[in-house]
Image: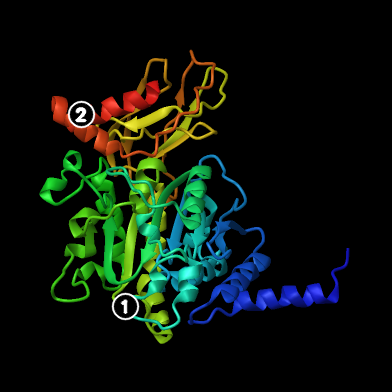
């Protein structure tokens, strides 16, 4: 069917917008127009959708890029960048637009970007808090009310917390992201902020079980998180220097444990790690929260390489499928690396897939179908990030022919429960985590 003249003009306008991305701040209508223009120009490489709406009804747009942008493909890991969850922290919002532009224009021209997009499904959310951005009428380097959503809530204090009860009312923007995490198989993520220059990693909150009494809240995958943070800081133009934004605060190598910096309840990166099976770090990209627009081009240059190198890390470690005697996938099987159990056990998705981010080395991978004997396999994991594929290790349970019940961890302070158990019997951290995992399985 022939398009009407008006439709043709509209499409041409969208394409022209996609082709000319300026270094300036893009408000809600401009941002939406740009994303729609990119999708119109690259329909087979991108998928544009809204994961929900803000308090004021603005769409929370996500552009997905990859060889299979519309759906998950077995063996291809899911990655995400989220920016502007604090509406007055604006640099991340704009550099993600330029990252989109760089990816789509480099595909099939740059061999590295082509392989990255062929082997990774990349989700980009330029703004999680569009209302806060629009409410920031007078840009400020330090603080404005635009930090919060329309209801006056800090979205990075609004998620369920693994260490204490978070009494904040879950906001529409937060719920949309929680649903998004639940519906995808995200492996790696970063959320982009402003007001400092550092890569911060889990945990943001803590208690005695994670060593917070020593000023550091350690996760079971602390070595991987340190590597991820260093990957970004070392490829950034200056973050790796660790000088921070003033002489009072420095960050060796440009990284910090979140709790060591300051304690934070209800943060997004801890939620991703505990309940989303997704490793997320927080990237503070500018000393000034809302810098002048004429500085945006330099911010893009400073972060460009780091943004790409960080995405590559989604191919660390090991991945595979868990299947039954008929070769059918087994969802909800627990797959963990021995010696680093998660308080909320990492489980296979509906396709029976698992992804574990691990540094190069020798590991024992434990696959468990509740009610059946566990299967252990020793793997030697190389650094495969340059090959854009983690090591593949499948598990086949020849005696299993049933689908395990759907299981999920309750959104309660799981580490608080461990603290109580510790006070009663004082077992080791390893035993405590295993006890909690067993309780979850039995439930």
> Of all residues shown, which one is farthest toward the top?
399
Left or right position of 61 against 140: right
Q: Quadrant of residue 192?
A: bottom left
Residue occupying image coordinates x 18% and y 65%: 251
Residue occupying image coordinates x 35% and y 56%: 157
Q: CA distance from mark 2 to mark 1?
A: 44 Å
> Of all residues shown, which one is farthest toward the bottom?
294
Quadrant in the picture for the C terminus: top left
Left or right position of 356 against 111: left
First in sequence: mark 2 or mark 1?
Answer: 1
> Of all residues shown, which one is farthest toward the right?
1
Asked if residue 377 can be seen in this view, the reply is no
| Residue 91 image offset from top left, x and y in percent | 40, 73
| Residue 406 image offset from top left, x and y in percent | 50, 28
| Residue 193 image offset from top left, x and y in percent | 36, 66
Classify mark 2: residues with Cα within 10 Å, few (<14), some (14-19) or many (20+).
some
Q: Please, is residue 35 above or below residue 401 in the view?
A: below
Q: Check disc 2 and report the residue beneath it.
A: 421
Residue occupying image coordinates x 39% and y 41%: 275
Q: Secondary structure at mark 1?
A: loop
Viewer-nearest of discs 2 and 1: 2
Q: Check disc 1 and report the residue beneath it.
A: 288
Q: Secondary structure at mark 2?
A: helix
Q: How is the image coloured?
A: rainbow
Asked if residue 3 can be seen in this view, the reply is yes
Quadrant in the picture for the N terminus: bottom right
Nearer the observer, 220 or 183: 183
Nearer the observer, 286 or 59: 59
Classify mark 1: residues with Cα within 10 Å, few (<14), some (14-19) or many (20+).
many
């Amino acid at each position: 069917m022939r398009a009407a003249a008006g439709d043709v003009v509209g499409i041409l306008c969208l394409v022209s917008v996609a082709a000319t991305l300026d270094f300036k701040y893009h408000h809600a209508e401009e941002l939406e127009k740009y994303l729609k223009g990119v999708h119109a120009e690259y329909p087979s490489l991108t998928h544009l959708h809204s994961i929900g709406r803000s308090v004021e009804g603005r769409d929370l747009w996500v552009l997905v890029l990859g060889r299979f942008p519309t759906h998950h493909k077995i063996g291809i890991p899911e990655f995400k960048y989220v920016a502007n969850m604090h509406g007055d922290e604006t640099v991340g919002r704009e550099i993600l637009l330029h990252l989109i532009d760089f990816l789509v224009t480099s595909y099939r021209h740059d061999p590295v970007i082509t392989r990255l997009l062929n082997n990774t499904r990349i989700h980009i959310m330029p703004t999680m808090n569009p209302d806060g951005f629009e409410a920031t009428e007078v840009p400020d380097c330090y603080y404005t009310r635009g930090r919060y959503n329309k209801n006056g809530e800090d979205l990075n204090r609004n998620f369920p917390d693994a260490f204490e009860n978070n009494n904040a009312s879950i906001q529409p923007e937060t719920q949309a992201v929680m649903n998004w995490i639940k519906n995808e198989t995200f492996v790696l993520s970063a959320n982009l902020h402003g007001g400092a220059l550092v890569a911060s990693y889990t945990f943001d909150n803590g208690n005695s079980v994670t060593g917070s009494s020593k000023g550091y809240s350690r996760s079971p995958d602390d070595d991987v998180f340190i590597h991820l943070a260093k990957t970004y800081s070392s490829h950034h133009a200056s973050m790796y220097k660790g000088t921070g934004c003033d002489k009072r605060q420095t960050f060796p190598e440009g990284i910090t444990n979140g709790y060591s910096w300051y304690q934070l309840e209800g943060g997004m990166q801890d939620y991703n790690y505990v309940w989303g099976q997704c490793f997320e770090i927080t990237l503070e990209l500018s000393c000034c929260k809302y810098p002048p627009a004429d500085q945006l081009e330099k911010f893009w240059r400073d972060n460009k390489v780091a943004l790409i190198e960080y995405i590559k890390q989604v191919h660390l470690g090991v991945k595979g499928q868990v299947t039954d005697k008929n070769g059918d996938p087994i969802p909800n099987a627990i797959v963990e690396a021995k010696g680093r159990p998660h308080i909320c056990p990492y489980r296979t998705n509906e396709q029976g897939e698992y992804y574990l981010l691990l540094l190069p080395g020798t590991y024992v991978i434990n696959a468990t179908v509740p009610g059946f004997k566990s299967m252990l396999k020793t793997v030697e994991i190389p650094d495969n990030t340059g090959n854009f594929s983690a090591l593949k290790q499948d598990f086949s349970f020849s005696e299993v022919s049933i689908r395990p019940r759907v299981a999920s961890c309750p959104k309660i302070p799981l580490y608080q429960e461990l603290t109580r158990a510790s006070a009663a019997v004082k077992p080791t951290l390893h035993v405590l985590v295993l006890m909690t995992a067993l309780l979850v399985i039995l439930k």
